[in-house]
Structures are given as C-alpha cells and as structure tokens.
Image (cartoon, grey):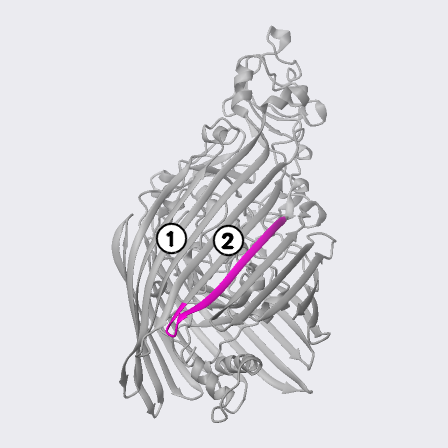
C-alpha cells in the first residue's frame, strides 16, 4: 500500500509539482509571477476530508491517509476494494471477489473491523448511494470506476459532526478526476498461477477544458472469471475433526445431508442411500460440497461516468457528476440440501402400505423418521445478480466579493436489483405429495427425472434503494486573529433514504425448503444543520510555532427517532517546524438503516462448532427490528507528526485511537450463542439470561441447531489501538526512492452481549465476523528512473487464535493460525511519451491460506486471506 499525506510539507510539494506541470502546458504567466508562486496562491485553500473549511495545510487534527492513482495501478486492482481492504486499519469481515457464500457480488471496506456500515463512503465529498441486492445498506465499491479515481483520502477518525451518520470508524472519500485534458486508454488482464480467476478490464477517459469550463467522460468494462474450490488443495474438500479432546484428527468430510438421502429413525436408525442401496451411515457417505462451490466468483461490470463544470458568471460555476454502474455477478454452491420439517411415517408395501420396502431391515412399519437429502440430481445452486446503480449530482458553487464561498447541490441515487437462485425444491409441495401418498421419498427414482421436475423452481427476488440529498453550504474567513485567520463553515442538508426487498412468492409463503423469508420496505428522512470553526490560538512562540483549535457541531432530526446532536473538538500544536502534536475528542452516531429497521426475518446458514452435533452449519434466523435506536460513540485520537529537518524526506506519524460505541446495533457471534445456550448433549442451558431467552435455541433430530440472532441494541463495542506510519523519500544510485511502512497495533476489541458479558475479539479469527489480528504491517519500496519504476510490497498479518476454540483449545485440531506475509512486485516502463507498459505479480511466494477450526468458508477465512494464490497481471496505457 502506497500512502501519502504524512506531512503538510510533503503534500503541498507534491500538489505544486503536479499543478505546475499542468499549468506549464496550458497557461502563460506574467514575468513578475512564477508558476510556482501562482500555484501556491491557488492551493492555499484546499478541501480536506474531515473538514468543510478550505485551508492551506492538509495536516489536520485527524489522521488522514491519501492513496494516489499510481498506488492503485501498481496493485493491479480493477476495483478500489482491492486496495482499501489491504490497509492495516481495515479488518473484520469485508466482502470481495473471493467470497462465494454470502457476498452477493458486493465489495466493501471495513475500517477498524467495526463493520462496513460504520465506514462512511463518499465520492467527491458527498454520500454515495447504498447499492447491491435487496434493501442495500452499504456502498458496493464495484459501482465506483477505478480508472476514474484521482486519489482516495481515508480519514481514520469519527466525523459525524462533519458528515452525519455512519462516520464512526472513519471516512473513505474517493476523489474522481475532474480536470482532465486529452484521451487515455488502458487495457489490463490478469490470471492466477493455477490458470483460473482470469480478469480483464478496458477503460478510456476523455476530457476537454474550454473557456468556460471542462468535461470528463469515462467508461470501464471489467470481466472476471471464476475459480473453483475443487482446484485448490486447501479447499477441495470440507475438513472436519474427530477424536478425543487433545488428540483430534482431521478428515475429508462434508455434509450429513448426503447424496441418496440420509434417514434418522426414531428407534436409532441412521441410514444412507448413497449408491442407490440403503446402509448404515458412515463418514464415507458425507457429501463433499466444496467440489461444486466457487472459490472466487465471476462477474461482469460496466461503469460509465461523467463530470463537468461550466462558468455561469465570473463568480458562479455550475457543476455536475453522473455515474452509472451495471453489474452481472454469479455464485455457485453445492446442490440444495433439503429436509422434512415434520417427520414422515414409514408405511412399507409388505405391511399393506404404499412405500418401498427398502428400509425394512432398519425401520419398522409405522415408525416416524426424519429425512435429509443432497439434491445432486438437480444440479448445483446457481446464484445470479443483475444490479443497476445510478448517481447524479448537480449544483452551483460560487464566491462572494469578500472571498466567502458557497455551494448548493442535489444528490440523487437509485439502486435496483434482481437476484435469482436456480435449482431449488418446493419441499412444502413434496411434503403434501407424501401425505397424499403420491410421492415416495424413500424410493430413489422419486428424486429423478420427471418425478422431481414439478417440484424444482427458480427463486426470483427484487430489491432497491433510493437516496435524495439537498445541501447548502457556506465557508470563509471570519476574522484575523494574532495567530492567524479564523475559518468558518456552516450548512444545511436534507436527506431521504428508502429501500425495499420483495422475496420470491414461494419463499415469502414459506413453501420452499428453507423457512419463510419476509419482505422489507420502509423509508426515513432527516434534516441536519452543522457549523465548523478553525481557530488559530498561538503562533511564532517558543514551542508553539502554531497552535490551532478546530470545532464542529451537527444537529439532526430524524423522522424515525427524533433529534440529537454530535460534536467534535480538535487541536494541532506545532511545537516547532519538525514536530506537531494533534488530538481529537468527538462524539459520533449511526442511525439504523431501513434494512436494520424494517428488514424481514429470513434464514441464514452459519458455520459453528458444537459438541452436540457433527453438523457444521446452524440455521440462524436474522432480521430487522423497528425498535432500534441510534448507536452513539465517544472517540479519541492522539498523535504526533515528526519530520526531522536533519533527514530530508523522512516523516513519521504515530496515532492512538479509542472508539467506544454504546447502544451497538449488532447480532452476537453465532458460536458464542450456541455454546452459551446449548450443552454438549443438546440441552438448553443458561435459560435465565437475556441472550439465551432471545435466541429460542433448539436442536432437531438431524442434529441441526436452530436459533434466532436478529439485530438488537446490544451493550457496547470498544476498540483501541495505534497507527504508525513512516515515509521516506530519497535519492540514491541515480534513482528516486520512496519507502513507506504502515503498522496498526490492536490494543482492545470487545463487544458486550445482552447480559453485559464482554466478548473479547482481539487476537482472534472467527467463523463469521472476520479477523482481529493484534498486529498488521504493510511495507512498500518504489524505485523510479527516467522512464521506469518498480515497486515491492510486503503485507504482514499476525497469527491469531480461533474464536471457536476460545474456551477449550483441546477440543480443536487447529486452535490457531500462524502469521503470514504476502509479497507483491510490480513495474512500469514508458515505452514512448504516450505508451506505458506495466505489470506485476501478487503473492509471489504463492502463500496458502491457513486452516483453522471454526473457519468461515473454504476451510479458511476469505475475508482475511488471499485464496487465489500467485496472481499475474499486465497493463498497457496509451495517452494522447
């Protein structure tokens, strides 16, 4: 990861260099004013993420990381999630191309591991429409064209007072190209070392600056192929564990919902029909569901975007932005496992009944049995999504005679989706046919051909979300103080959000195999006003070269829960030119989304490890809660910025962060619920606790654990740690060098359940909410010559313990994972002034993701680890 903005001095120098180059080709200056002096005048007031006040210095009280376009290109990423998810400050669960089970094709970023819904994503400083399938509540990063990105500013601090809801963990502000002249064409392709997961992208950007303004148009098309779990040694079969505690063994296992049917009799029968003849069920009868599942999912994506300005008068500019994204994505999982929700009565023909006699050696006439089956005869479950997202911003910005600036804008976003799931079975109708003595479930031929065809269907769901924002803002200098000029900004915003999800009619009625899925529909609106001050306190004093105070406050009034406010205070204290100390104290909030408030109940099948069952998935009912109230947070950051004058080009930042969220909207870890509320024999325990009462936990005769885990305002979530960044630019061996070291140390991460019990995630890797490594470090080194550059990057993730083994490591074969280091290399060469060739290899050493007990998917955690292995990419860029 290449990052900038470690000192204001370095940033300003970079901005001046870029701007001066552009000016030299388009403008002529008076002999009395140099190009650099003129540009200083231009950039002495710039907008910085985290503040509405334009200022000359990008070093604010809040830690900010800037990722430029060159770092994105060097990574080989065709979507910005490929870069953001590798930041050391990112953690927890983040969906990406590798996630087959549950991603629905979305890509997200998760700062501090606090959840993607607590990271605010902006485009050019304004909110991006939530996108994806259903009643989407987070931004799908696929909707933002990577080829249009000029830079990404990541604010690693709460900013609700400035931006409103969601900005608890931080803000990702994606700045798109606005002033661009000429034509640029890029073609890129890549493939894994195993010959799969191929990905190709083509994009062009065209821009023109004219007397009254400018316009930039961009189009990007990306196509990604799939990779199968069957084609990697670590994932080609689901691993299970057996044996006594302390001497566990692993074996190639799978699901007890097996091919040919699995029968559990009331009198202890445990039968398999695999191979066409019934026999005692053994581990060899388990179904290997990995061979039919994607390891990395395929996708096609089209992005169209435009940005333009027009000078209406000498003091007023009209601006507009438009983005359109269409995504076609797919996932594939093993054939559907089905089961009867009510036991069937066995009635063999030899006893005067109507069913096959094949079960008679084990099951008696009139005995009730439970039945499960893997529907291999019908084929794999095929998921697909078609998602359309559009965002349009129009507005006016201007300047008064006194130098104050203003803008008025309207931001409209709309997201529509249709998702399908093929090769499902209507178990409700099958059960009716069994009761009507028209379908013998124990006869193998019943599940084949024309007999099963009437019960097969494709689920079709639709959903969407909509965003409307009208905003006004005003900023300028209030008064000159002895230490400098006091800056001011204020504004008003009206925002309305709505979302809906309409499940398939069979699913909505509960007539399919899975439990009933409810619809989602709702909306809310909010009025907000805010004000911000930048107050210079001291300057040009011993150990107080410059001391500035920043303050912000926001008042909001929601239609769903009422009004409140949030505030922020920051201090920067530059003791002398080399050293600055900074700190921020703020409050933040996150209002419940439409999906969290009005989301219908639906089943989710989650990984668990529990001694009462050998099944590795539990049926968990999830859903929204209209009684939810906003989360509130207290956030503290304290840090220093050091640029020693005796080492030119060296800068260091160290920041401590502490985030304490109360009234947290969340669900509890599934393994935690199962082990707190069910003993080793499948009996309910701790029934007097709020956790277990709300879970309604049970276990059926097949060994499937079922419980509720819907959203609630649960206790607190607290996290704290340190961010350390070192950057060094220097010259040597006739080359320009740039080195960077980013490190995040996690000191605390804990959540509290309904009963006030702390759940400590620091240093643990989970089966559902991702990983919380205590130490993550990224190192990068770039060498640049006259017409070439080369970059080496290393990414370190500390070892962790499995959360599923927290209480007793002896019950696990792999209670921990070792640390891992990924190595990436890339290079570029300017073939001519107009043509650049580049390429690279990610995960050069082909590191394999680790197995751990209680894993998420593919026997590992695709949220955290690279599952594709060594990956090659090449790129050609042509500029006119």
Q: Which of the 4 image quarters holds residue 868?
A: bottom right
Q: Is residue 563 above or below residue 840?
A: above
Of the numbered discs 1 and 2, the one sitting upstream in the chain is 2
Please tell me which residue lies in front, 461 or 477: 477
Quarter of the figure with the N terminus: bottom right
Q: Which residues are magenta?
A: 299-317
The x and y percentages for residue 202 are: 65, 59
Tell me, yes or no, whether the highlighted magenta stretch contains residue 571.
no
What's the CA distance linking mark 1 and mark 2?
Answer: 18 Å
Residue 140: mark: 2
Quarter of the figure with the C terminus: bottom right
Closer to the camera: disc 1 or disc 2? 1
Element type at mark 2 = loop
Q: Is residue 562 above or below residue 530?
A: above
Q: Is residue 525 above or below residue 511?
A: below
Tell me, yes or no, whether the highlighted magenta stretch contains residue 313.
yes
The x and y percentages for residue 241 are: 62, 44
Q: Which of the 4 image quarters holds residue 481?
A: bottom left
Please tell me which residue lies in front, 107 or 354: 107
Element type at mark 1 = strand
Q: Is residue 844 above or below residue 371?
A: below
Please name the residue that numbered disc 1 is placed on.
468
């Amino acid at each position: 990861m290449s990052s900038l903005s470690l000192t204001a001095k370095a940033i300003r120098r970079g901005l001046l260099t870029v701007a001066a180059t552009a000016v030299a080709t388009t403008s002529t200056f008076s002999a009395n004013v140099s190009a650099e002096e003129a540009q200083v005048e231009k950039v002495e007031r710039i907008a910085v993420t985290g503040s509405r006040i334009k200022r000359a210095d990008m070093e604010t009280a809040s830690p900010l990381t800037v990722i430029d376009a060159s770092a994105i290109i060097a990574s080989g990423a065709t979507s910005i999630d490929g870069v953001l998810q590798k930041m050391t400050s990112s953690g927890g669960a983040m969906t990406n191309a590798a996630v087959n089970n549950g991603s629905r094709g979305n890509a997200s970023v998760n700062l501090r591991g606090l959840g993607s819904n607590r990271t605010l994503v902006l485009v050019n400083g304004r909110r991006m429409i939530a996108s994806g399938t259903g009643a989407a509540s987070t931004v799908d990063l696929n909707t933002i064209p990577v080829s249009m990105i000029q830079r990404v500013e990541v604010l690693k601090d709460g900013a609700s007072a400035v931006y409103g809801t969601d900005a608890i963990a931080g803000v990702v502000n994606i700045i798109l190209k606005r002033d661009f002249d000429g034509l640029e064409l890029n073609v890129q392709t890549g493939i894994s070392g195993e010959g799969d997961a191929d990905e190709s992208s083509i994009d062009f950007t065209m821009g023109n600056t004219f007397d009254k303004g400018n316009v930039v148009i961009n189009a990007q098309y990306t196509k990604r192929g799939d990779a199968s779990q069957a084609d990697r040694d670590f994932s080609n079969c689901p691993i299970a564990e057996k044996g006594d505690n302390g001497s566990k063994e692993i074996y190639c296992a799978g699901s007890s919902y097996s091919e040919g049917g699995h029968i559990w009799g009331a009198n202890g029968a445990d039968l398999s029909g695999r191979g066409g003849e019934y026999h005692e069920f053994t581990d060899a009868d388990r179904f290997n569901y990995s061979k039919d599942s994607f390891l990395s999912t395929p996708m096609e994506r089209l992005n169209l975007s435009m940005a333009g300005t027009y000078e209406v008068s000498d003091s007023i500019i009209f601006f507009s932005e438009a983005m359109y994204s269409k995504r076609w994505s797919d996932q594939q999982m093993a054939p559907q496992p089905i089961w009867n929700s009510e036991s069937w009565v066995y009635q063999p023909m030899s006893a005067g009944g109507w069913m096959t006699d094949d079960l008679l050696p084990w099951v008696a006439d009139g005995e009730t049995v439970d039945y499960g089956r893997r529907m291999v005869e019908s084929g794999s479950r095929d998921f697909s999504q078609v998602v359309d997202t559009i965002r349009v911003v129009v507005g006016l910005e201007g300047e008064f005679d006194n130098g104050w600036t203003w803008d008025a804008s309207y931001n409209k976003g709309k997201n529509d989706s249709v998702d399908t799931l093929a090769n499902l079975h209507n178990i409700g109708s099958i059960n009716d046919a069994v009761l009507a003595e028209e379908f013998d479930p124990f006869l193998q031929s019943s599940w084949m051909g024309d007999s099963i065809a009437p019960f097969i269907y494709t689920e079709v769901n639709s959903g969407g979300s909509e965003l409307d924002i009208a905003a006004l803002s005003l900023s300028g200098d209030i008064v000159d103080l002895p230490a400098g000029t006091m800056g001011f900004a204020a504004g008003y915003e009206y925002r309305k959000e709505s979302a809906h999800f309409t499940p398939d009619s069979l699913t909505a009625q509960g007539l399919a195999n899975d439990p009933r899925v409810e619809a989602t529909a709702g909306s809310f609106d909010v009025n907000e006003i805010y004000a911000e001050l930048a107050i210079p306190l001291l300057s040009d004093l011993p150990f107080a070269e410059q001391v500035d105070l920043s303050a912000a406050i926001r008042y909001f009034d929601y239609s769903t829960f009422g009004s409140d406010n949030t505030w922020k205070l920051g201090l920067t204290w530059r003791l002398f030119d080399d050293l600055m100390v900074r700190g921020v104290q703020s409050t933040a909030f996150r209002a419940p989304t439409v999906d969290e408030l009005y989301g219908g109940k639906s089943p989710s099948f989650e990984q668990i490890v529990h001694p009462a069952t050998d099944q590795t998935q539990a049926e968990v009912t999830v859903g929204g809660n209209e009684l939810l109230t906003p989360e509130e947070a207290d956030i503290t950051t304290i840090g220093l910025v050091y640029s020693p004058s005796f080492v030119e080009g060296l800068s260091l930042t160290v920041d401590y962060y502490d985030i304490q969220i109360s009234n947290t909207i969340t669900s509890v870890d599934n393994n935690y619920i199962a082990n707190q509320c069910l003993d080793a024999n499948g009996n309910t325990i701790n029934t007097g606790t709020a956790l277990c009462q709300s879970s309604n936990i049970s276990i059926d005769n097949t060994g499937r654990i079922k419980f509720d885990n819907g959203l609630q305002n649960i206790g607190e979530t607290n996290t704290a740690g340190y961010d350390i960044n070192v950057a060094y630019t220097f010259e040597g061996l006739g080359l320009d060098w740039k080195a960077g070291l980013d490190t995040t140390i996690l000191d605390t991460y804990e959540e509290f359940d309904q009963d006030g019990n702390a759940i400590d995630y620091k240093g643990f890797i989970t089966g559902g909410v991702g990983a919380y490594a205590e130490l993550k470090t990224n190192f990068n080194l770039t060498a640049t010559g006259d017409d070439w550059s080369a970059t080496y990057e290393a990414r370190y993730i500390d070892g962790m313990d499995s959360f599923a083994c927290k209480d007793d490591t002896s019950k696990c074969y792999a209670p921990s994972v070792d640390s891992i280091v990924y190595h990436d290399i890339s290079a570029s060469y300017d073939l001519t002034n107009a043509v650049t060739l580049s390429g690279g290899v990610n995960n050069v050493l082909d590191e394999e993701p680790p197995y751990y007990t209680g894993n998420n998917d593919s026997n590992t955690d695709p949220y955290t680890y690279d599952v594709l292995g060594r990956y090659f990419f090449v790129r050609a860029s042509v500029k006119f």
